[in-house]
Amino acid sequence: MGFSFDSFEGIGRVFPLLGEADPVVLDDVGIRHPRNQRARSTIHTAYRDVTHVAVSPRILWLGAKDSVYVIPRAAFAGEDAPELLVNALLVKIGEQPDGAAQLERIAAIERISENPAPPVVTRSLIGICVAVFILQQWLGIRLDLAAEMIPALVNDGDLWRIITANLLHAPGFMGIIHIGINMLVLLPLGTMVERPLGPARTICLMVFAGMGSMLASSWFGSGPVVGASGIVFGLAGAVLWLDYRRSEQLPAWWRFPRRNLLGLILLNGVLGALVPFVAFAAHAGGLVFGAFAAA
């Protein structure tokens, strides 16, 4: 059975989705679309709030002032539906009172998104953490004792621990899980921060978040503390700040759905408060200092 993408539902153009999902509809004032990849419910985004739209071989990204919305290409009933939808959406935006200026802003964002520089700082930090972890396995507890965050020793003058503790991770099998999770999350978050801010500012942000993380841990008497989680939370805080304050300047595929990001931060906060060996103060400090550094 075929679908016509010139069909109309009331005054809106309809782009059917597979299964029982409601179609994507363009009406006079906005676009009605799925809230996320799995939700059957839809949300209405006004044309004036659309910041950027992009299509890849797998995904359609719809950037808006309040979030970014992701629709898999496989969810559409027609093979070329994402491209047709983007073209129709841009036409609708152009018909709005301030449409020409909005299309110019979208075009400028599209140019920014072309050929982005590789996240050198983020990848370098991952490489350093992995190298330090290998060194930990060789030197054992000697390296841990010399570099981990111990508040009493920092108070006595071992200030380097505020930096070096961010590069260490737990020993043994738990350490593999510890560093694995941190690096898997650090890569996308670091990339999302480094693309708009650039390498130099990203280094400053990471250092600031790492120091803030360990200082918060020291303030609340936690210790010993190790791990790049504070930097990871700092990057999450930066991503959140950028999405709230700079959404109109970011390509849609450089962003993370805001509700999902808030949910992950809240979940990790709850786990940090409930699980004894998770450094809640370090995570909270990294989050706050990272957001502040981004600002």
Image (spheres, rainbow, N blue to C red):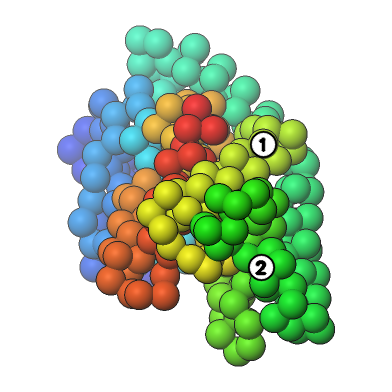
Q: Amino acid at mark 1?
A: Cys
Name the disc covering residue 233, or none: none
- Judge from the rendering whether residue 281 lies leftward or rightward of residue 250; answer left or right: left
Please state which of residues 106 and 4 is positioned toward the viewer in this rendering.
106
Residue 9, x across and y down, in percent? 22, 43
- Confirm or deny contact between disc 2 and disc 1 (CB under 8 A): no
Residue at (38, 41) in percent of width and height: 67
How many C-alpha atoms fall within 10 Å of the one at disc 1: few (<14), some, or many (≥20)?
Answer: some
Q: How many marks?
A: 2
Residue 130: % across, % down:
75, 70
Element at label 2: loop
> Viewer-proximal residue, 240 or 98?
240
For this orientation, the residue located farthest to the bottom is 173
Q: Residue 165: which quarter of the image? A: bottom right
Q: Residue at x 59, y 40 (%)?
A: 208
Sooner in the amino-acid sequence: mark 2 or mark 1: 2
Question: Looking at the picture, which amino acid does disc 2 mark?
Answer: Leu
Looking at the image, is 128 positioned above or below residue 176? Answer: above
Residue 240 visible in image: no
Q: What is the x, y in percent for residue 43?
A: 24, 45
Which residue position is annotated with label 2?
Answer: 168
Count residues near mark 2 (Cα–Cα under 10 Å), then give few for <14, some for 14-19, many for 20+. Answer: many
Question: Is residue 246 at least partly visible in the picture?
Answer: yes
Q: Which residue is mark 1?
A: 204
**Residue at the (76%, 69%) spot, across then down:** 132
